[in-house]
Image: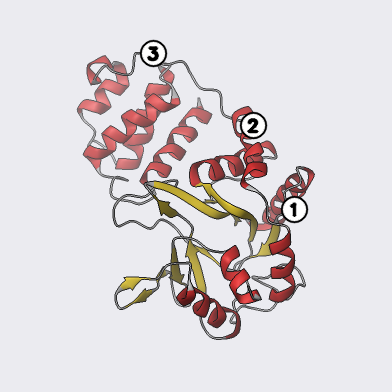
Amino acid sequence: MDRVEQFASLHAGGFVADVANGVKPMLTNEETVLAAGEEYELLIEQHLYGDEALGVYPLIERNGLFWVNWIAVDLDEGDISEPHADNLVALLEELSIHSWKEPSRSKGFHVWVYLERPLQAAMARNCMIGACRLIETPIKEVYPKQVKLGPGKIGNCLRLPYAATRNTGRQQMGDLTWEEFTDTAWETRCTPEHFERLHALYIKTEPVKAAFSYSGTNDSDDFTGRAKSIWENPFSEDRSSTLYRFAASLLERDYSVEATIHWVTQLDERVGKFKDREDGPLQIERMVESALRSL
């Protein structure tokens, strides 16, 4: 396997994104291009040497399950982005997981971990979230951003490093050439089994959840007070405020996070804020977590 093939394999995923001008799926004969195989490798060569700039949608579907070959965190928090990235790299190194800090195209940073073999997406995402929580690194841009996809959906992509069109000093791993990076990254890939050890951090750092106040099978007749009022008339204010206030009202009445997410999702089916968005479930989860922190 030559270096271009290794670079492509390190960043293999579901589909290829064209990020040269905006972000859109790469198409050939009106078909999305897979982020694996010979066509992908040819595109990677153009990414490294020519005028292509590529991203990859990470989720790979196999027999109804979703897998990833890499995990990344996109930090775009201004001046604190690099300290967050350095802290995350240091933590992972302490746990014998080699990671890579990449100055992104903006003023932010990406932290990458490459795997020897695919890992289920939900496990990969939760493990990285656990590591981030432990050192208070933002988790809103952990890739994969989705852990499953609906029909016709492809998720969110991340730009690949080492585009030939990149600005000097950005989108590369330190002072390494792409060849030097590829050689080292290939040799230091993490086994899925070793990366899964981070799941203990995910469990340890999980926010405290209120007890479930009902069996989970009852319907909306259980709602009282503000929750009942919002459920019965959800169109009295903007949709985001409606969903947030509804979440807070349930959490105040000791609904668990899972139950609150369930009912906010049901309400969103009616008000239509997130239901047609690929990241809808993630946005609802974030909203509920925000409401929980505000209590």
* Front label number (1 vs 2): 2
The reply to whether the C-beta atoms of the residues labelled 3 and 1 are less than 8 Å apart is no
- First reached walking from the N terminus: tag 2 or tag 3: 2
Neighbourhood count class around disc 3 (C-alpha, 10 Å): few under 14, some 14–19, many 20 upward? some
x, y percent for residue 283: 41, 44
Above or below 189: residue 8: below
Above or below 205: residue 54: below
- First reached walking from the N terminus: tag 3 or tag 1: 1
Q: Quadrant of the N terminus?
A: bottom right
Q: Badge 1 is on which residue? A: 86
* Quadrant in the picture for residue 44: bottom right
Distance from disc 2 to disc 3, alpha carbons, whole Å, reads 27 Å
Q: Name the residue rendered at 30%, 41% in the picture.
A: 239
Q: Badge 2 is on which residue? A: 200
Distance from disc 3 to disc 1, alpha carbons, whole Å, reads 42 Å
Q: Badge 3 is on which residue? A: 213
Above or below 32: residue 242: above
Could you say whether the residue bearing mark 3 is in a helix, strand or loop?
loop
x, y percent for residue 114: 63, 56
The answer to whether residue 145 shows anywhere in this view is no
The answer to whether residue 66 shows anywhere in this view is yes
Q: Name the residue rendered at 31%, 21% in the picture.
A: 226
Q: Name the residue rendered at 48%, 18% in the picture.
A: 210
x, y percent for residue 140: 53, 47
Rendering colour mode: secondary structure
Say which amino acid is labelled 3.
Answer: Ser
Q: Name the residue rendered at 27%, 33% in the picture.
A: 266
Q: Nearer the viewer, residue 187 or 216?
A: 187
Could you say whether the residue bearing mark 2 is in a helix, strand or loop?
helix
* Front label number (2 vs 3): 2
x, y percent for residue 57: 46, 61
